[in-house]
Image: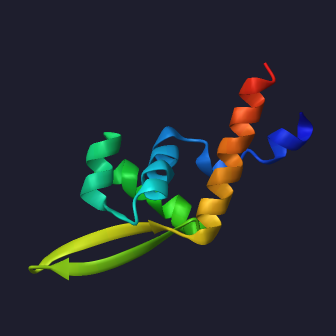
Amino acid sequence: MKNIILNINKAFDHRIRLGIMSVLMVNEYADFNTLKELLGATDGNLASHTKALEKVDFIKVEKQFISRKPNTKYLATELGKMEFKKHIEALEKLIKNK
């Protein structure tokens, strides 16, 4: 049981961060507006959660201009994918043990 809990990652302890990673695990990337719409998050809320995931190198941020409009897109890093998989597996094991 203790080993399972060690794989639960505090970086994913909020539903928005779980949502960001879930979207990025099944898509090559997602832009800010797509994540905002899918997760029902405010601009500020989404920005703070993406910054937290970027800070631990779980996501990568790319900024560009499309037709003179700024566009921010997010991609899961290899480290982020690996840590998220470990986190989900730990949660599944925890649930199955109950």
Question: In the rendered image, which quarter is residue 64 located in?
Answer: bottom left
In this view, 50 is above or below 5 = below
- Between 51 and 1, the one nearer to me in the picture: 1
Give how far across and how far down residue 46 sits, in percent. 38, 52
Find the residue positioned furthest to the right: 2
Pick the quarter of the image with the C terminus: top right
Number of numbered discs overlaid on the protein picture: 0
Residue found at x 27% / y 54%: 34
Residue found at x 50% / y 48%: 17
Residue found at x 45% / y 58%: 24
In this view of the protein, can residue 67 be seen by the observer? yes
Give how far across and how far down residue 66 sits, in percent. 15, 78
Pick the quarter of the image with the N terminus: top right
Give how far across and how far down residue 20 sits, in percent. 45, 51
In this view, 63 is above or below 8 = below
Question: In the rendered image, which quarter is residue 63 located in?
Answer: bottom left
Residue found at x 59% / y 61%: 81
Give how far across and how far down residue 86 sits, in percent. 71, 51
In this view, 4 is above or below 70 = above
In this view of the protein, can residue 49 be seen by the observer? no
Question: In the rendered image, which quarter is residue 95 located in?
Answer: top right
Left or right: 30, with 60 as reference point = left
- Between 70 and 84, the one nearer to me in the picture: 84
Find the residue positioned furthest to the top: 98
- How is the protein colored in the picture? rainbow
